[in-house]
Each structure stands twice: as structure tokens, then as C-alpha cells.
Amino acid sequence: MHTDDLTDFYRGWMIEIVQQNNGFQSVCHSPARQRLDDDVMYSREFLALNAGRALVDLHLACQQFSGVLRELYELEKLDFEEWRSLTESIVDAVGVCR
């Protein structure tokens, strides 16, 4: 990490704003060392920081929704194929729930 890099914490995640030649990139790390980034370069640090926060929010919402689906499956409100299809559609649509 460069000394110029900005680091912030949001909802338990560390968000690093890394300056590249062509802009700023946000890289998010969970407490369990899971890494998220969107491979987008931003023109300003605050844009990259806001994008990192949005990425964390999206990931957490996806986890919560996946948990609800799992509970519905365990309560036999969804069959296996419904659960699998819905869970895969979240991953496909959002891309951060891996």
C-alpha cells in the first residue's frame, strides 16, 4: 500500500482507495479477509470511496437475502431446485455474493 492511499472502515469492512496511473480504485476487505472490488477506475477518491461503500452494502444485502432463502428451504417452503435457482440468480445478477 502506498503512503498516499486512503483507508476507511465501513460496516466492519476495510476499504482501501488505491491511486493508479489512471484514477482511483476501491478495494474492500472483510474481517474474514474476503476481498471485493469492482475493477472500475474513478476520477476522484471520494467517488471510489462511495463505490466501495455501495459494494459492501450490496454484498451484505446479498448475504442477508441468501440467508432468508436458505431458511425458506430448510422450512420446506422452497424445494431444492427453487432454492438453487434463486440463489444462482442473485449471484448472476449481483456478482458479489460468491
Image: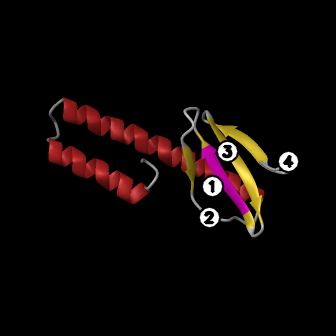
Q: Nearer the viewer, mark 4 or mark 1?
A: 4
> In the rendering, which numbered label is found on residue 15?
3
- Helix, strand or loop for disc 1: helix
Total number of numbered discs in the rendering: 4
Q: Nearer the viewer, mark 2 or mark 1?
A: 2
Q: At 40% across and 37% down in the image, what residue appears?
A: 64
**Which residue type carries mark 3?**
Ile
Q: Nearer the viewer, mark 4 or mark 2?
A: 4
Classify 10 Å Cα crowding around label 4: few (below 14), some (14-19), many (20 and above): few
Is residue 61 left or right of 22 when viewed as pictured? left
Residue at the spot of label 2: 40
Q: CA distance from mark 2 to mark 3?
A: 14 Å
Q: Nearer the viewer, mark 1 or mark 3?
A: 3
Q: Are marks 4 and 1 in contact (CB under 8 Å)?
A: no
Residue at the spot of label 1: 51
Q: At 17% across and 40% down in the image, what residue appears?
A: 78
**Which residue type carries mark 2?**
Val
| Among the two numbered marks 2 and 1 on one chain, the one whose residue lies closer to the N terminus | 2
| Among the two numbered marks 4 and 2 on one chain, the one whose residue lies closer to the N terminus | 4
